[in-house]
């Protein structure tokens, strides 16, 4: 299924590239409001200037009115198109926070290194502190839980590093890399096993689903920070 989607995407990329080449050459888009050639009503090639009012005349005027802008030449090979499309189609973004306990203990660098080594691209990251009210807004889904106060006080107790990460299957893969919420139950080698002290102070947060990731990314980052 994925392979089929990729093939379709490659075909679409080829079509797009054809359109771009046409635009570069003629200054207009392919199939904008063009009619099939055999529906053009004037005899062709008889004069340099087509009949005023005819489709060809309007087309030529259009081309003259919109001279092509200088554009860089883009060479697409099948491999590079596949690479770009693979990234576009299969990659997923997730949201993560290096929590105050890990920042205080100086584990930020090691945690980021482990994340990058696992193949995540850090799309955006910043160091900041949040207020208790901001932590409450972020964790609003846990508002009714007994640990809500402890959690929001902890999250506002010192600097954190919120970040947006990208890779294929990013959400599930980050959760695997983090390990269980309670570090006592986390697998060997996971971030929480190595760097977390308790379920409350567990070094790192990661989104648990696509909708959550969308909300959490938007809570901390503006679109302009997410190129
Ligand atoms: P996180 O992945 O950031 O999402 C919600 C957080 O609530 C979780 O990590 C834990 O840090 C915290 N949490 C979950 N259960 C408990 C608990 N029983 N006591 C304290 N904190 C908890």
Image (cartoon, rainbow, N blue to C red):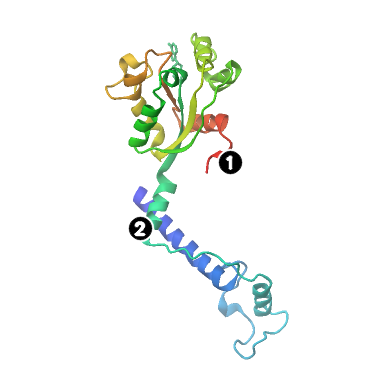
* Residue with the mark numbered 1: 224
Up/down of 102 relative to 48, above or below: above
Q: Is residue 202 visible?
A: yes
Identify the residue at image location x=64%, y=82%: 41
Up/down of 81 relative to 104, above or below: below
Identify the residue at image location x=53%, y=20%: 139
Up/down of 6 relative to 29, above or below: above
Task: From the viewer's perspective, tell me whether residue 32 is left or right of residue 77.
Answer: right
Q: Residue furthest bottom?
A: 46
Residue 42 appears in which quarter of the rendering?
Answer: bottom right
Q: Residue furthest front?
A: 106
Q: Residues within 10 Å of mark 1 (few under 14, many from 20)?
A: few
| Mark 2 to mark 1 CA distance (whole Å) | 29 Å
Residue 143 appears in which quarter of the rendering?
Answer: top right
Q: Position of residue 217 (x, y in %)?
A: 52, 32
Q: Which element type, helix, strand or loop, lies under badge 2? A: helix
Residue 79 — which label? 2
| Ligand 1 lies in quarter | top left
Point out the frontmost of discs 2 and 1.
1
Q: Which element type, helix, strand or loop, lies under badge 1? A: helix
């Amino acid at each position: 299924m994925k392979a089929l989607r990729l093939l379709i995407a490659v075909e679409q990329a080829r079509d797009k590239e054809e359109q771009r080449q046409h635009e570069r050459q003629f200054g207009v888009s392919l199939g904008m409001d063009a009619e099939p050639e055999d529906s053009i009503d004037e005899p062709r090639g008889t004069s340099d200037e087509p009949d005023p009012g005819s489709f060809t005349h309007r087309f030529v005027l259009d081309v003259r009115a919109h001279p092509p802008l200088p554009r860089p030449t883009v060479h697409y090979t099948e491999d590079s198109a596949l690479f770009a499309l693979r990234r576009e189609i299969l990659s997923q973004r997730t949201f993560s926070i290096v929590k105050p306990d890990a920042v205080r203990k100086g584990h930020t660098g090691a945690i980021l290194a482990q994340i990058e080594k696992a193949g995540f691209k850090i799309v955006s990251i910043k160091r900041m502190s949040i207020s208790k009210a901001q932590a409450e807004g972020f964790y609003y889904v846990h508002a009714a839980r007994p640990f809500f106060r402890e959690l929001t006080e902890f999250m506002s107790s010192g600097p954190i590093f919120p970040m947006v990460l990208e890779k294929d299957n990013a959400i599930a893969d980050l959760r695997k890399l983090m390990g269980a919420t309670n570090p006592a139950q986390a697998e060997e080698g996971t971030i929480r096993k190595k760097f977390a002290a308790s379920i409350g102070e567990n070094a790192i947060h990661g989104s648990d689903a696509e909708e959550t990731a969308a909300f959490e990314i938007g809570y901390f980052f503006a679109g302009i920070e997410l190129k």
